[in-house]
Amino acid sequence: MTPLLEVRDAGKVFHTGGFLHKKHHVAVEHVSFAISADRPSITAIAGESGSGKTTLARLILGILRPSTGEIRYNGKPVGSMDRGEWRTFRREVQAIFQDPFEVYNPFYKVDHTLVLSVQKFGLAKSRREGRELIEQALRAVGLRPEETLGRYPHQLSGGQRQRVMVARALLLKPRIIVADEPVSMVDASLRATILESLLKLYTDLGISLVYITHDLTTAYQLSGNIITLYQGAVAEVGDVERVIKAPQHPYTQLLVASIPMPNPKLRRAKLEVAQDELIVGGVGCRFANRCPHVLAECRESAPPLYRTEPNRATACYLYKSAPAIHATEIATLLQ
């Protein structure tokens, strides 16, 4: 069956500088995964700042065009959709961004962004019907319409503003939501509420989620599959339970080791990491200068993905005894 959404060997290169001093920055390289049309899923894209997570999100949403590979929706490349197909894509693939304040126009009440969505996509035949849809969406994310509508963005808390954006996405009855760091800028006390709202969209409405985060704790709580990125490339991919509890790639091990323990008296095993300058571009493994297990071949060529388990792959020469797979085969791991 044709996947609902397919990221096929996608890459993005940004060019900076003048004609004589042109520089190339590889933000994303050889990333692939797919979302089934008949089986909703939650896939986490995890990594530290600068790993390419937000660039990948913008590629998925069609905000950026890939330099290599392609993004396909219902089997059609997003970049070659006609007007009708693009409109359908814009409605069925919704975004929730990191900053719950910047997405609002401070001169308009929060009602504006909700009403505009109803009008633009013809969701209601009358103003009253549109109002009922908006109130229903707000209640679905735990907000009281009488306490939310009629207010300006600055009159709501960060958590309330973010839940209004979840309600906006819900209004359009999307099939996929791309949530880019949706809880990183709200109070810890509100994170659970927002994550619960996202999880309900998946469990109750069958909406697939692409959850972009640097926080492996929330990735573990929310997702079924995880892809860890390092400098734009896939480091490890697979079932979130296995990847978080028994990470294989040294970079994933570093991320897991950075998760605070619930008891401050407990300490995780310390992972020694070199402090040399990072490799950006060029040959070899991107993580080589930070890796405590670096081999000579790591500096000579970038490792492929090795299928270490039926639903897991790691881009590390430590697992070269396992069969190598192409990036486009990642989708077969996340079933």
Image (cartoon, rainbow, N blue to C red):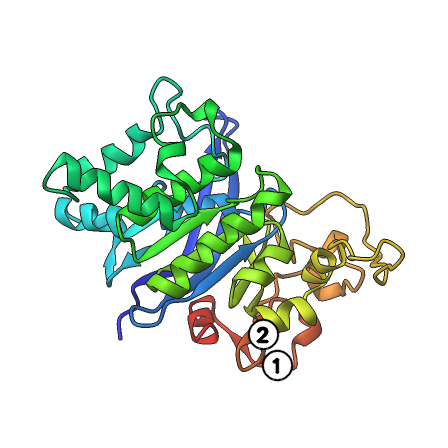
**Looking at the rendered structure, which numbered label has been put on residue 21?**
none
| Residue in the picture at 42% in, 59% down | 200
At mark 2, the secondary structure is strand
- Few, some or many residues within 10 Å of mark 1 (<14, 14–19, 20+): some
**Residue 234 screen position, x and y as percent:** 55, 60
The answer to whether 229 is drawn above or below residue 238 in the figure is above
Residue found farthest to the top:
107
- Few, some or many residues within 10 Å of mark 2 (<14, 14–19, 20+): many
Question: What residue is disc 1 on?
Answer: 322
Which one is nearer the viewer's eye here, 2 or 143?
Answer: 143
**Residue 69 screen position, x and y as percent:** 37, 56
The answer to whether 123 is drawn above or below residue 227 in the figure is above
Is 55 on the left or on the right of 302, as rendered? Answer: left
- Tell me, yes or no, if residue 20 can be seen here: yes
Image quadrant where residue 116 sits: top left
Residue found farthest to the right:
265
Question: What residue is disc 2 on?
Answer: 306
Image quadrant where residue 35 sits: bottom left
Quadrant assignment for the N terminus: bottom left
At mark 1, the secondary structure is loop
Which one is nearer the viewer's eye here, 227 or 65?
Answer: 227
Is 158 on the left or on the right of 95, as rendered? Answer: right
The answer to whether marks 1 and 2 mark residues whose Cβ atoms lie closer than 8 Å is yes
Tell me the kind of residue under disc 2. Answer: Tyr
- Tell me, yes or no, if residue 65 can be seen here: no
Badge 1 or badge 2: first in the primary sequence: 2
